[in-house]
Image (cartoon, rainbow, N blue to C red):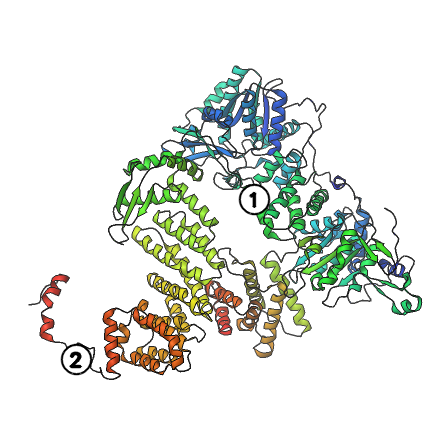
Amino acid sequence: MTPPTAFSSSAVAPPPATTAPSVPRCPRVDPGGPLLLGVRHHGPGSARGVRAVLEAERPAAVLIEGPAEADALVELAADPDMRPPVALLAHAVDDPGRAAFWPMAEFSPEWVAIRWALDRGAAVRFFDLPAAHTLAADPTWDDGEEGVAGDGARIDPVAELAGAAGYEDAERWWEDVVELRGDGDPAAPFRALAEAMGALREAYGHGGHPRDLVREAYMRLRLRAARKEFGDSVAVVCGAWHVPALTLRTTVAADRALLKGLPKVRTGTTWVPWTHRRLARRSGYGAGIDAPGWYAHLFTAPDRPVERWMTEVAGLLRAEDHPVSPAHVIEAVRLAGTLAALRGRPRPGLDETTDAVRAVLCEGSDAPLALVRDRLVVGDVLGAVPEGAPAVPLQRDLTRRQRSLRLRPEAQDRELALDLRKETDADRSRLLHRLRLLGVHWGAPAPGRAGTGTFRETWRLRWEPELHVRVAEAGVWGTTVEAAATARAEARAVAATTLTDITALAEDCLLAGLAGALPGVMRALADRAALDTDVTHLARALPALARALRYGDVRGTGTAALGEVAAGLAERICVGLPPACAGLDAGAAAPLRERIEEVHQALGLLPDVGGTRERWTGVLHRLATHDRVPGLLRGRAARLLLDEGRIPDDGAALLMGRALSPGARPPDAAAWIEGFAGAASGGGLLLVHDERLRGLVDAWLASVPAEAFTDVLPLLRRTFAAYEPGVRRALGELAARGPGASAPGVPGFAPDPDRERADAVLPLLHLVLGTEVPA
Amino acid sequence: MPVPETIAKPGDGAETDTAPDRPQTSAEVLRPHAEHAFAAELAALAAADDRPRPARWRLSPWAVATYLLGGTLPDGTVITPKYVGPRRIVEVAVTTLATDRALLLLGVPGTAKTWVSEHLAAAVSGDSTLLVQGTAGTPEEAIRYGWNYARLLAHGPDREALVPSPVMRAMTRGATVRVEELTRIPADVQDTLITILSEKTLPVPELGEEVQAVPGFNLVATANDRDRGVNELSSALRRRFNTVVLPLPATPEDEVAIVARRVEQLGRSLELPVPPDGAAEIRRVVTVFRELRDGVTADGRTKVKSPSGTLSTAEAISVVTGGLALAAHFGDGVLRPADVAAGLLGAVVRDPAADRIVWQEYLETVVRERDGWKDLYRACREVSA
């Protein structure tokens, strides 16, 4: 076999060769001046380069791109409890919703520089524009030079350079020229990149980032100050994009002029824990790195990154019961290497390793590959910050809300009754529900004293000291209670495994007034419902939805989406229920009867969209008439239809006659009676009043053969014993009298009303109804 | 690499089998082999190819990938694309062969598995005729070797009496052998491949000898991964393959085009008139197939359950062809929803209990709501009822 590199093409322009690789020549502000290390945020290759250059040059101070206010927080980075990924968080004190994050992973050049400086006793300064200005200007200010909040004019410098080198994929170009170059002169990429960026800046100016000019003016001022303090022994770690601007010859006055009159807000800064998943997210505050786990691996692996990676993948797959042998790993490594050669890349990148994992370790299947992507390529890593870090904005937001709603956090138990028709009480209820969603169990719902009305709620409040910790943990989700609860609910909806979990979550969202989370939750609910093959799950989920719809009405939350999902759910139940009911034994039929009843009730609460009720009636008809459906369910369906007036009385008699005909097995017939006239279904009053039905039951009972009677007896006993005593007695009397004897009406009543005695009730009735007594 | 002691060498098999010398031209046969049909392209690629070639490869891996994916050579020769699909897949397939690993092409019917394997063999070895067609009745002799019984009886067991299989011939020649429909071959016969793939030798105990593969030998197998009633590969065999799954057409447009083209060809040979407005109905059938297969509606907003059947492009073609036949012979010659409804039902509902629910849910939650699909909904309801 030919060595892999033999296939490599000349498309990759190697960075300019160095004369003496042992002495890194770095870009500098001016000859002998401060080092300029232009990096790509979160690039492990850049990080490795930064570490090597710092180690070689040993500057006395390191300037890092980040809000100037964060200088005070640098010491915390040395705390043993501090574990990346973490983010620097700056937020407006009066409006915690205005916040900006500077995420840093273990492999971020910024983080590497901070840790190096702290370990070696060098000074660290953040030298970007203070957050006080950036937050005042625009709450959604983002740090990314990748320009995630893209209005079309912004250029992506990496993409520009990749395009110039003939690459379609910017990530791939970057991997080829920077990340995958393991050895050689660590300063070479900085030089090449600085030159390239210089050319780009000449061509594009600020490239659609007009605020960069202001930021860079500030950076230059801070750099001058640092030089005054530390001389030329200063290193700058910032986005490569800014490097050319730092070598510009400008005057202090010109830079000051640019900074004049910038708006300003009061800000707080702190460290918050971050996760790899959030680094991978393209929107919001994510850093838009597709493969943080892979990058971390590249950064931490001492050697043989591909071999080590494949071993890790194999370990993961084995843990998940996919048999993977060392021979597999060997073949995967070979395939990745040869694939890289075929594609003309210096070393296997993520694409090649993924292709090799798919073809060899996953045997072509995408399911285990998704696992690899989720657990390793992105990764489950969660950062941590020490306890001494300043309070998160979520805590401030909570404190503000507690004050405005006059809910003091107290250590002792306190019961709080809320009337949701009042604005303040409704707000309090929402706050408590949101906190519960965030895992801050300050209040627990208590059984209300005021009965079951939907506009009352009772809470038991108790503030435990560890709830502060919970709030700090929840800070990862957002900077205000509402935003954090919304984000948390959405994440939970995605992760939920059962349908009932999601419906319960939807209910919680409505209670918490999180309209923003509802679309995401509803989407998850609809998806899960579409794929759930067990109709009982769907039937279990529907009542909660119907309840939620009703709450929504009480609290004035928008519930249109909910109604749609509920209608879809009902549709699926209508399709799936009849086959699910066929051929069941008595044990399986009982729980299904409950489901049918719940669905029936829930559908009564739902608005009738697109003829759902008509369909449901059709389903009940099918259940009532289908021979393979167990008697219990047939009887129940017939009774529900009768109660709704969907079948005429003689229709019920027809169904009963059929169910109790001699051909039917006696136990099945007895179950039919239980379903039709059991106490759970509204009791035997029906039998008391409808002589024809009673006659049918009577005739059937009389015709049950003696040997079958002992089988049927317990069932019948259960049915009739559950009736109220009065009903039982009336039935007994009627049965004793025999068929036809009670023709005129109900026992104990005269055939005609007694007008005189009825009139006597009228005044009281009028009093109750508040109407005038007619003269 | 030592020259192996081969059994077929002194015999007549190896000499008469030098495939490229065969005097067949494309004019004489109904369907010429890939290496004949595209001989000019292969020659141009070989001439332009200055990259290193693995032992006994006719082209470098790069040139093989170019042959399959198409491109333009420096001298202006245009290489037509043989496979339209993700580049990644072809690259992984070619690289697999270059690393001495056997290649398993998986996919549902109609994803060009055989086509790709034929062209791979043609480009790598210049010969796509070393082929084992897998069936339920494929015997061990088709993979190992058989005997010329007349000779065996007359002279006793010797090399001359041995009839080599395509696999054995490929081993001695250092060529690529293809095994079609690997999963249709009975499991015990499949397992014969294990020693060949891992040890690269084929023992002949009757003669007390063995055949050792020379560099360049490799094997491309194709299999249908969602078909019922196949012989699942043993994990021992599976481990010896790198697996590449050939995907279904990526976009609805591609699939509609494929279906329309095939339907027209089939219709011509069956002498069915192709109605002028059939395209709209084809698009709907393809949409139904894609949505059920992918488990999500075309707009990506609603998930749906997937039935147990394959729902391959090939089946979509047969649904439309069946509908055309209905329309031509029993209808008014226009392809109407009612003509395809029965075919759709038959293609989707393979398992009478579970699939019926899937189909009805799909009808009620997707088809019913869709603008302009009312007629299809009604037709399907009528058929399903």
Q: Nearer the viewer, residue B72 or B119?
A: B119
Residue A564: x and y in percent read 40, 58
Residue A554: x and y in percent read 29, 53
Identify the residue at horizontal 51%, vertical 73% (top origin).
B383
Q: Chain of mark 2?
A: A
Reading the image, the residue beneath label 1 is: A375
Where, by quadrant of the figure, is residue A771 drawn? bottom left
Q: Residues within 10 Å of mark 2 (few under 14, many from 20)?
A: few
Image quarter where the N terminus of chain A lies is: top right
Identify the residue at horizontal 43%, vertical 52% (top origin).
A501
Q: Nearer the viewer, residue B350 or B117?
A: B350
Q: Can you say whether B353 is above or below A317 in the image?
A: below
Q: Nearer the viewer, residue B161 or B269?
A: B161
Judge left or right: residue A525 versus residue A456: right
Image quarter where the C terminus of chain A lies is: bottom left
Q: Residue furthest right?
A: B155
Q: CA distance from mark 2 to mark 1?
A: 79 Å
Where, by quadrant of the figure, is residue A461 drawn? top left
Q: Secondary structure at mark 1?
A: helix
Reading the image, the residue beneath label 2 is: A751
Residue A659: x and y in percent read 38, 78
Where, by quadrant of the figure, is residue A263 drawn? top left
Tag 1: residue type? Arg
Identify the residue at horizontal 44%, vertical 66% (top origin).
A588
Q: Can you say whether A704 is above or below A335 in the image?
A: below
